[in-house]
Structures are given as structure tokens and as C-alpha cells.
Amino acid sequence: MKCPVFLPILLLTACVGRGQLDRQAPDLRLVYHDLALETAAGRAALAARVAQSAASFCRTYDPRDYERIFALGLANSGNCPGVAGIMLARRMPARVRRAYQAGRRGE
């Protein structure tokens, strides 16, 4: 009688691919509170952190994982860093976004 109970469990575990259970969701995070955004060096550091965070996100992002699609622009690996940077900028307060844009321009 044990066989009918274990068969569905065995079939369910076979449906989950290797690595899907332990894979973490990609994280799009940015810390900027320690930067002096009123200086050119602070703005440049902010722009560098955005680029670094976007690149890190794109290394772990899998566009074929339909449960974790963030934006369609991320599906192309060439577009991913730019789109991820835009997504980060949208989350920033207005003064931080202005500092980021100035940092990208080298101001």
C-alpha cells in the first residue's frame, strides 16, 4: 500500500528541475545614503554604484524564468544593464535621481 502514496511525491519531485529550488531571486538594490551627492565625486560614485548594481542584477537574472519577469526590456542581455539602471532610477527620490543623471553626464 505504500507504493500509491509515494508515487505522486516521486512524480512531483521529478518535475522540479535541478537548481530551481535553491536559486535566489535576482536583487535590484542600491545604497546611496553614505554618498555626498552635492559633490561631483559623490555623484560619480552614485553613477558607478547604479552601473555596478545593474550589472550584478543582470548576471543573475534569467529572462526565461516567467515567475520573475521584471520588465520585457530585460529579456535581451544587451539591454539588461540599461533597463535595470532605469528601473533603479525610477525608485530614487527626485534629488537623488538628479544627482545620478548629473553623475552620468560627468558633472
Image (tube, rainbow, N blue to C red):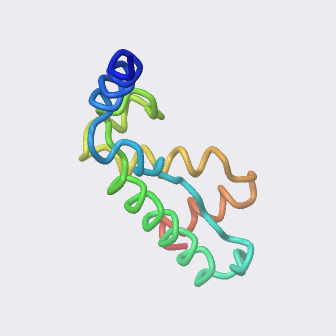
Residue at image point 74% right, 73% down: 33
Nearest the eye: 107 or 97: 97
Q: Residue at x 41, y 51 (%)?
A: 22
Q: Report whether 105 appears left or right of 20.
A: right
Q: In what quadrant of the picture does the N terminus appear?
A: top left
Vertical side of 47 occupied by 42: above or below = below
Q: How many marks?
A: 0
> Residue 59: image x %, image y %?
32, 57
Residue 83 falls left or right of residue 16: right
- x and y percentages locating residue 92 in the rendered image: 68, 52
Residue 21 in the image: state x and y as whole percent.
41, 44
- The image quadrant that residue 103 belongs to is bottom right
Residue extending farthest to the front is 1
Along the viewing direction, whichever of 63 and 35 lies nearer the viewer = 63
Q: In the picture shown, does residue 105 fall above or below 62?
A: below
For image coordinates 35% across by 42% down, the residue present is 20
Quarter of the image where one finds residue 100? bottom right
Q: Quadrant of residue 62?
A: top left
Q: Residue at x 33, y 20 (%)?
A: 3
| Quadrant in which the C terminus appears | bottom right
Say above or below: 90 vs 10: below
Horizontally, residue 81 falls left or right of residue 92, namely left
| Residue 95 drawn at (x, y percent) | 75, 58
Residue nearest the viewer, comparing 92 with 16: 16
